[in-house]
Image (cartoon, rainbow, N blue to C red):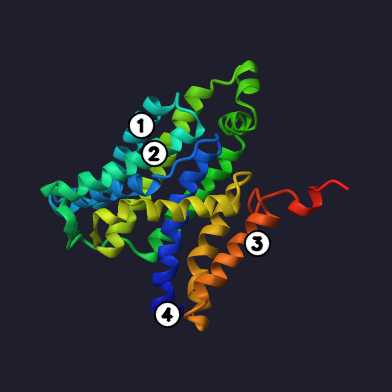
Amino acid sequence: MISGYWIELLSGATISAMASLGLYVQMSTGQMNVAQAAFLGMGGYAAAILTLKLGLPFPVALVAGAALAAVVGLLFATVVLRLSHWWYAIASLAFGEAMVSIASNLDYTGGILGLMGIPSHTTFALLLSVLILLLLFFVGLERSRFTLGMKAIRADETASMASGVNARAIRVAAFGLGAFIAGLAGGLHVHLLTVITPTDLGFHISLNYFVNVAVGGTRHFWGTLVASYALFILPELLRFSATDRFILFGILLVLIMIFLPQGLTSRRLAFRHRPG
């Protein structure tokens, strides 16, 4: 039997993996989104309000929260798509902080204290079931023309457009899909913890998802999945060195970036590419 501590830890890692997989889709087109937690929180707040205040069934609230995040993601991507790479990232950062401010100042979302007493509907078994369905979806997605288009845009946008790829449509759709997955994870998250606060939408949370994708790489979604679980659980495994565990964790991340600059799904180690 798995202890309650490990169930709680693995539940958190699974939610992190879902949100990171959504970001993986977006980054597969070369977009740098640093506000993924805002979409997770958006789906979480919407689902929580629907179950806590309106009494809607949990599955309905879950899908509705994810759909709201997707719609907002589509609108955001449509508006900022013309921005260059770094300005796109800055725009997403500003959007995320704006969502934190809005959640902090609305009475309906509980203000700075957030929402508490949310019904507990999420179980570890449900999380695993949703993750398995999500992975099956990704297996099918990897073989689609949509994924080929995403990878072509990431490799060379000009060449892909010359080949007939609609880069704008694919990027908007990818961002919306990634936001939907994050919103779904958010709904599961709030009904697991039974509480959500504006800080759950913040940049420091988004940065965790960004690191997961960076370490896992954008060549294949399995890298993001493995990195999400490893980076969530590893700090707990390093508790034998309470004062140095984050130093050890940081050193490990630096080594990965040096020897696997394209992530865990890199085709070769970095030093094998060096001339001579």
Between marks 3 and 4 in the image, the one whose residue lies nearer the viewer: 3
Q: CA distance from mark 3 to mark 4?
A: 32 Å
Q: Which residue is at the front of the view, 251 or 42?
A: 251
Three-letter amino acid code of the residue under disc 1: Phe
Q: Residues within 10 Å of mark 2 (few under 14, many from 20)?
A: many
Secondary element at tag 3 = helix
- Specify which label sits upstream in the sequence, 3 or 4: 4
Between marks 3 and 1 in the image, the one whose residue lies nearer the viewer: 3
- The reply to whether callout 4 and callout 2 are in contact (CB within 8 Å) is no
Q: Residue at x 50, y 36 (%)?
A: 31
- Specify which label sits upstream in the sequence, 2 or 3: 2
Q: CA distance from mark 4 to mark 2?
A: 39 Å
- The reply to whether callout 1 and callout 2 are in contact (CB within 8 Å) is yes
Q: CA distance from mark 2 to mark 3?
A: 28 Å
Q: Residues within 10 Å of mark 1 (few under 14, many from 20)?
A: some
Q: How many marks?
A: 4
Three-letter amino acid code of the residue under disc 4: Ser
Q: CA distance from mark 3 to mark 1?
A: 35 Å
Secondary element at tag 2 = helix
- The reply to whether callout 2 and callout 3 are in contact (CB within 8 Å) is no
Q: CA distance from mark 1 to mark 4?
A: 42 Å
Image coordinates for residue 174, horizontal then vertical, percent: 47, 34
Q: Residue at x 39, y 26 (%)?
A: 78
Most extreme residue toward the right, as rendered? 276
Q: Which residue is mark 2?
A: 92
Q: Which residue is mark 1?
A: 76
Image coordinates for residue 71, horizontal then vertical, percent: 32, 33
Three-letter amino acid code of the residue under disc 2: Ser
Q: Which residue is mark 4?
A: 3
- Specify which label sits upstream in the sequence, 3 or 1: 1
